[in-house]
Image (tube, rainbow, N blue to C red):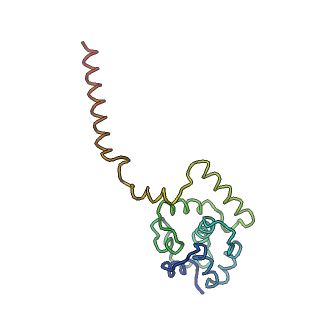
Amino acid sequence: MQPLYDLLVAHHRAKCKETRDRVFALLGLVKPEERRMLGRFFPDYAMAEEHVLIITLAHLMQYTFELAYRDRQLITPDSEEIFLGLGVKLKTRRRVLIRRAKWLDYCDWDAQLLQLLALRDQEEQDLGSAYSEEAEEETEVLEGASLWPGGAQVMISVFLFALAVAVVWYYVLRL
């Protein structure tokens, strides 16, 4: 019996067709105390994959039974083994999941937790921060690149043109 954190790291290369099984399959291997905490929500195949990931991350970040005695690293988008253990490859998606898991009061909320997650889903969509994996992949490929070929050169040209116009107007107005 091991903590879920350690199991996810140990099995981060495991293959699963159903992403939720990356967590659900490990429930039988976690310590009984931790299983009781996770058992409030899992396994539930009716639950959205996104909610499974958010609840799992909230558990890993907030659950303190035994974790207080261990030297744990902070979970960040760069926590490769944890996120690969959860089946999340894209860093942009990792950031969103971490942000959503941080606001979730995992240890105190039971019945209303799923309602809150659904409400947050709607808020995120209303604010336009919902994402698709294809869009994220394109974003990561383009990350650090200009929005169009030669974009930096165009910006410099526009700036120089505007500067030239300003200089001409200055001299015209002085005459």
Q: Is residue 122 left or right of residue 141?
A: right
**Residue 70, placed above or below residue 101:** below
| Residue that protrudes farthest toward the top in the picture | 175
Q: Specify whether 30 is left or right of 110.
A: left
Residue 140 percent location from the top left of the image: 42, 58
Q: Position of residue 27 (x, y in %)?
A: 63, 81
Task: Specify the quadrant of the image occupied by residue 120.
Answer: bottom right
- At x 60%, y 64%, the residue is 50
Q: How many marks?
A: 0
Residue at 51% over, 73% down: 82
The residue furthest bottom is: 1
Q: Residue at x 50, y 69 (%)?
A: 74
* Of residues 107 and 18, the one drawn nearer to the viewer in this rendering: 18
Q: Is residue 88 above or below residue 145?
A: below
Quadrant occupied by the C terminus: top left
Provide residue 161's location: percent of width, then percent of height: 28, 31
